[in-house]
Image (cartoon, rainbow, N blue to C red):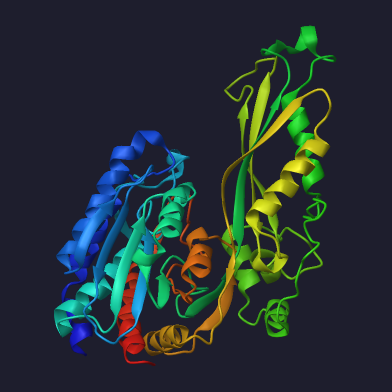
Amino acid sequence: MTQIEAYIAEHEQRFLEDLKGWLRIPSISTLPEYAADVRRAAEYAAGQLRSIGLDNVRLIETKGHPLVYGEWLKAAGRPTLLIYGHYDVQPVDPVELWQTPPFEPTIRGENLYCRGACDDKGQTMLVFKALETLITTEGGLPVNVRVLIEGEEEAGGESIEHYVRSYPERLTCDAAFICDTHMPAPDLPALISGLRGIIYTEVEARGAVRDLHSGTYGGIAPNPFHALALIIAGLKDARGHIHIPGLYDRQREAPPQEQRFWQEDPLHLAETLREEMGVAQLSGEPEYPPLQRIWARPTLEIHGFVGGFSGEGAKTVIPANGKVKISMRIPPDLGLKAEEVYRLFERRVKELAPPDVEVTVRKIHAGEGVLVSPEAPVIRAASAALKETYGREPVFIREGGSIPIAALFNDILQVPIVFMGFGLPDDNLHSPNEKYSLKQFFRGVRTVARFLQLYGAGT
């Protein structure tokens, strides 16, 4: 056992307790009533960075929730790595589906259950502990690091975007590292080579000036919910095809090796995902293989309706207005920026709207997708570290989700990005009973520590 491995083994319980303390803070960034808790979570992160020996640790105030910054810049002649994470979490609804309270970390079997356990407090904390391990056992870090943690990733990331665009000189680095992704299976290490972008919208339809009795007015009154149903049906058909003119005009073909991987699915990922979802068959465009659908095709998803009557029993009301939350995921291969997709979406919604209602479209947030070259030295160091820890070469795969800050780092800082996360497909991100594998957490600490060593050595 190396000195690093011995330190991690000796301090496992404390590492876990530090994570639990962070998880108990309900840092739900999208709900205003949790603003004080979000700030407490930021202060907790800053405390962790100070305790492990980083310098210049501070909260960076923004118009929204604060950023957390710390640095260690004492490795002369070595590269500088920008480490990103986020301390905010998703809402917990429906809370009745949680087996244990969502903000009381609970161990069942080999997993830790809590909101934020994986996304992203658990993954960010393992990076903190890798830094602590190296500083304590080796007296310093093998590379320079800047740590930037945000509190609005789950609410659009507006504050960090403004900061990065306004002060890129404060984040000078040679590469960026994001631990907010997953692996296909517990013993199958992976590096993410691509992420989709996103637009998240709210479409509102308005009819009469007030709710109406469906007997008195039914047959002549506009119904905003019916209008929204027509719009949704026109946006995407029953076979998963999106009908937005102009959406595919700049579509680029993915490299042949990626297309072969999607078609052959040698790791049987599609079947694993189907079983995990508990469905009889997969949905979506049947002419494309499942892996291409989740990684490299655009999506359009409905997230929720607002308005009308949805309580127990009956109420014969025609609502005066209704809203629907709709998002689209945008693969980099589409050749369109998020703003361009939003404008196409907005135009199509208004084309589909019946003439008896007034429809407005609001963009809640947006972010770009990104592709990463596996040839960068920092990627090779990450690959070698994963191979040492897991005993096999990592696979390079895309991920269907979005991390908007990654595209910003790519565009503004113009550095390669390492997406190396230790989540698993069944971690229930954004859902009740979110969890994180304890084995993955501690493996992650060892892997990140080794990655920093190899990167510093020029591997």
What percent of the width, then of the height, locates residue 191? 50, 78
Residue that appears at 25% across and 64% down: 70
> In this rendering, would 60 be left or right of 201?
left
Please count the marks in the image.
0
Where, quadrant-wise, is the N terminus in this rendering? bottom left
What percent of the width, then of the height, locates residue 102? 36, 46
What percent of the width, then of the height, locates residue 205? 70, 28
Please name whichever residue, 410 or 90, is drawn nearer the observer in this view of the structure: 410
Q: Does residue 419 sit above or below 408 in this rendering? A: below
Q: Does residue 422 sit above or below 113 in this rendering? A: below
Where, quadrant-wise, is the C terminus in this rendering? bottom left
Q: Quadrant of the rendered structure where residue 118 is?
A: bottom left
Residue that appears at 37% across and 66% down: 169
Please name whichever residue, 452 or 267, is drawn nearer the observer in this view of the structure: 452
> In this rendering, would 354 be left or right of 121?
right
What percent of the width, then of the height, locates residue 79? 34, 82
Residue that appears at 33% across and 70% down: 441
> In this rendering, would 82 be left or right of 217?
left
Q: Quadrant of the rendered structure where residue 107 is?
A: bottom left
> In this rendering, would 105 be left or right of 167?
left
Q: Does residue 43 sit above or below 135 in this rendering? A: above
Q: Which residue extends farthest top?
A: 216
Residue that appears at 64% across and 70% down: 271
